Image: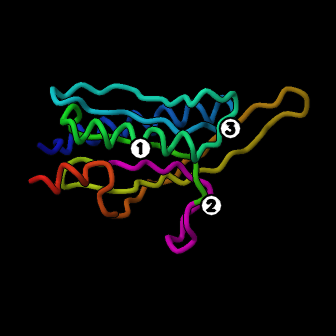
Amino acid sequence: MGASPEKLQELLNYCIDFAKVMLNDSGDFYPFGATLSADGQVSAAGGYNGQERPAPQDLYRLLCESFTSSAAEGSIAAAALAANVDIPKEYNPQAPDGLRVHLESEGFSRFIYVPYVIRKKGFFAKSISVTTFEPFAVQIGPTMFNAASDAS
């Protein structure tokens, strides 16, 4: 049961839009995600490991494990996991900083990178301006839906 391209786009748009809000508000964000239920509903997902200032990698791992478990149970049709990353130079990004969305469903697994530049304005009252560039996709092997695809 894979997700339709339109539903995958909806998950991706959610992550891009939320990341832009967080970048404009604070210039950074912790990993977060969204899932697509078996009946087609998009839901936001966040992680908490009990620490006030957790390592982003720990939250990413926590969310990925949760999505993998939900995929194996069949309770989600797709998942999107967003992180603030340094885009690998081998991809020749328009900016080194980027949002990376790991978008996955049965039979579909991609990293979608959205390069961005942050400019801080103002001397006393700082404001943040974020410019994003054209997203690009990199095909990767499945991780969250690996068990689901192995069972078919």
Horizontal placement of 8 versus 22: left or right?
A: left
Q: Which sits earlier in the primary sequence, circle 1 or circle 2?
A: 1
The amino acid type, in three-letter code, at marker 3 is Gly
Which residue, given by chain and number where applicable, does mark 3 sit on? 27
Label 1, label 2: how far apart the Cα atoms are = 24 Å
Pointer 3 with pointer 2, Cβ within 8 A? no
Pointer 1 with pointer 3, Cβ within 8 A? no
Rendered residue at 51%/43% (across/down): 60
Q: Position of residue 107 (x, y in %)?
A: 18, 55
- Identify the magenta region: 87-103
The amino acid type, in three-letter code, at marker 1 is Cys
Front disc: 1 or 2: 1
Residue 37 drawn above or below residue 130: above
Q: Secondary structure at mark 2?
A: loop
Q: Secondary structure at mark 3?
A: loop
The amino acid type, in three-letter code, at marker 2 is Pro
Front disc: 1 or 3: 1
Which numbered marker is on residue 96? 2
Q: Position of residue 119 (x, y in %)?
A: 73, 44
Rendered residue at 29%/27% (across/down): 42
Q: Which sits earlier in the primary sequence, circle 1 or circle 3?
A: 3
Which residue, given by chain and number where applicable, does mark 1 sit on? 64
Q: Which sits earlier in the primary sequence, circle 3 or circle 2?
A: 3
User: Residue 7 sits in which quadrant?
Assistant: top left
Q: Position of residue 95 (x, y in %)?
A: 61, 60
Residue 125 drawn above or below residue 71: above
Of 128 and 91, which appears nearest the observer? 91
Q: Secondary structure at mark 1?
A: helix
Residue that extends furthest to the bottom in the rendered view of this protein: 90
